[in-house]
Amino acid sequence: MAKFGFTTQLQTIDFDLKSYQNVLDQRMQELTKEAGRSWLNTVLSIVPTWSRASRATFEKLAKEVGEQVTFGPLAAKKDRTNLGQSNSDGGVEFKGNEYHFFYETTLRYLEYNEFNAASPGAPPKPYGQLINPTPYNFLEAGANNFRSFAANIKLPDVSLFISGKPI
């Protein structure tokens, strides 16, 4: 007699949610800072030194993500680094399952040059001819950089936190 059949082995499945959440949280914090560095490098490639004020607006974010804002030669009559620092904010935030980096400025010269074709004139227009043409559009370039960065993110492998036990 020929006998044909199958044997089954059932298992219970266990997912170590707590361990996965810890690894995911650590990875998301790292990715947020990495995304901030990538964004920052993109926008700093556009915003010129001039009086140092505009580039200085990025220093708070840079410090939070482990980056440094560099300055080229001073092209203005006065170093205005403090003006940029006092008219900006930036950093990283981790709240629950939300991970952000942020940047904001109220430096009117930078705001003007971001959105307008600037020509020499009374404030907030520049007092001299700009080396970098305006509008800068650094926010759009930064947003494009972030979207590209986010599209390539790899999260921790869930399967590493799944185990089974025979029933």
Image (spheres, grey):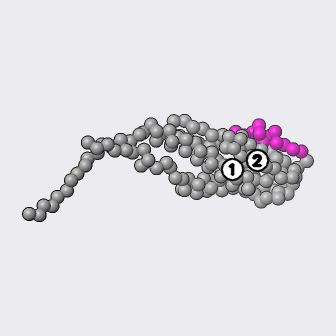
- What secondary structure is marked by label 1? helix
Front position in the image: 144 or 32? 32
| Outermost residue to the bottom | 2
Relative vertical location of residue 163 with respect to residue 145 in this rendering, above or below: above
Name the residue located 51 percent from the left edge and 36 percent from the top edge.
96
Amino acid residing under circle 2: Val
Amino acid residing under circle 1: Leu
Front position in the image: 23 or 121? 23
Relative vertical location of residue 134 with respect to residue 110 in this rendering, above or below: below
* Residue under label 2: 69
Name the residue located 54 percent from the left edge and 53 percent from the top edge.
153
Locate the C terminus and report the quarter of the image it occupies.
Answer: top left
Name which of mark 1 and mark 2 comes first in the sequence. Answer: 1
Q: Is residue 90 visible?
A: no
x, y percentage for residue 158? 43, 47
Q: Is residue 118 magenta?
A: no
Name the residue located 77 percent from the left edge and 44 percent from the top edge.
56
Q: Is residue 82 magenta?
A: yes
* Residue under label 1: 40
| Outermost residue to the front | 1
Front position in the image: 32 or 54? 32
Q: Residues within 10 Å of mark 2 (few under 14, many from 20)?
A: some
Relative vertical location of residue 86 with respect to residue 147 in this rendering, above or below: above
Q: Is residue 165 left or right of residue 123?
A: left
Q: Is residue 106 left or right of residue 31?
A: right
Write the start and end of the magenta stretch as one range: 78-90
Q: Residues within 10 Å of mark 1 (few under 14, many from 20)?
A: many
